[in-house]
Amino acid sequence: MSAASATPVNVVCIKWGTKYPAYYVNRLHRGVTRFLKRPFRFLCFTEHPEGLDPGIEVHPLPVEPFEAEIVAAMNREGRKGAWRKVSLFRPGLAGMEGPVLGFDIDVVVTGPLDDLIDFAPGKVCMRREWRYERRGKDGGHGSVFLFDPAKHPFLYEEFAADPAGSVARHKGSEQFYTSMTALRHGELTYWPGEWISSFKRDAMRVFPFNRFQEPRLPETCRVMCFHGKPKMEEALEGWTGSFWRGTRPASWLARDWLWGETPGA
């Protein structure tokens, strides 16, 4: 193991409100423990710490001088992404030093994570958003992201300087703000698309095959994102959104999302 990989990396998530139960964070933590070989800190910023597993560093949800602007951005019609994550970019937050690997909590870790950290040292890394990738345009997806607060302070500072303008200029999308701000500074790198998969785009079968074939887990997938519908519980049991859109149960989720749990947990 190199000196760089021996230094603990920061793994962070935010759980705000009560939409997602504590087990979403616990299962993410277990997935990281399973697939990240280097030392790490796992930090969860939340106002509801009840039920979180030992080994998870619990920190209060950050409160910003521009708190009112964050709340307005999160509640505006057509908003995309959680502007609450901007606080993670603040240099010095919770004593974090070095690379920060951030996750939304509606993801499942399915493969090795160390390559995500080593892919482009010193850069902001994201997967290219699927819609933009198809159109040959720039813009990252925010379910998994890597940055270093000390090297990329502009991610926080530019939003703090003009919160309302930052939201308006970036389609109301936090992930678009993050990726395009990093791109403008020459600091954005895209992870290989096959590392970060979308359940609804890469796993679900198209009609009529979705009626009788299990959703697939791509062989090279490291993180499966459950943005939109279905979420993990629905995909685990099978889900129907419409006559055309639905999925058989994804049996591999019992291994990768429920890994390490005792029966009935």
Image: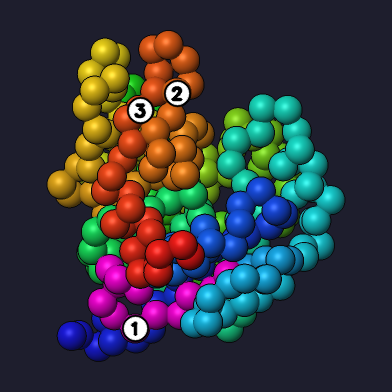
Looking at the image, which residue sits at the far front?
Answer: 264
- The label on residue 247 is 3
| Circle 2 residue | 240
**Which numbered circle lies on residue 39?**
1
Task: Tell me residue 197's x, y (percent).
Answer: 31, 42
Instruction: Say whether disc 3 or disc 1 marks the residue closer to the N-terminus.
Output: 1
| Segment colored magenta | 31-44
Is tag 1's residue or tag 2's residue first in the polypeptide sequence? Answer: 1
Residue type pointed to by label 1? Pro
Circle 1 or circle 2, nearest the eye: 2
Residue shown at the point (48%, 21%) measured from the top left: 241
Q: Amino acid at mark 3?
A: Thr
Residue 71 x, y percent position in the rendering: 78, 47
Left or right: residue 231 compared with residue 69: left
Residue 157 vs residue 223: left or right? right
* Residue at horizontal 29 percent and vertical 14 percent from the top: 207
Instruction: Where is residue 58? Give x, y as percent.
Output: 62, 77
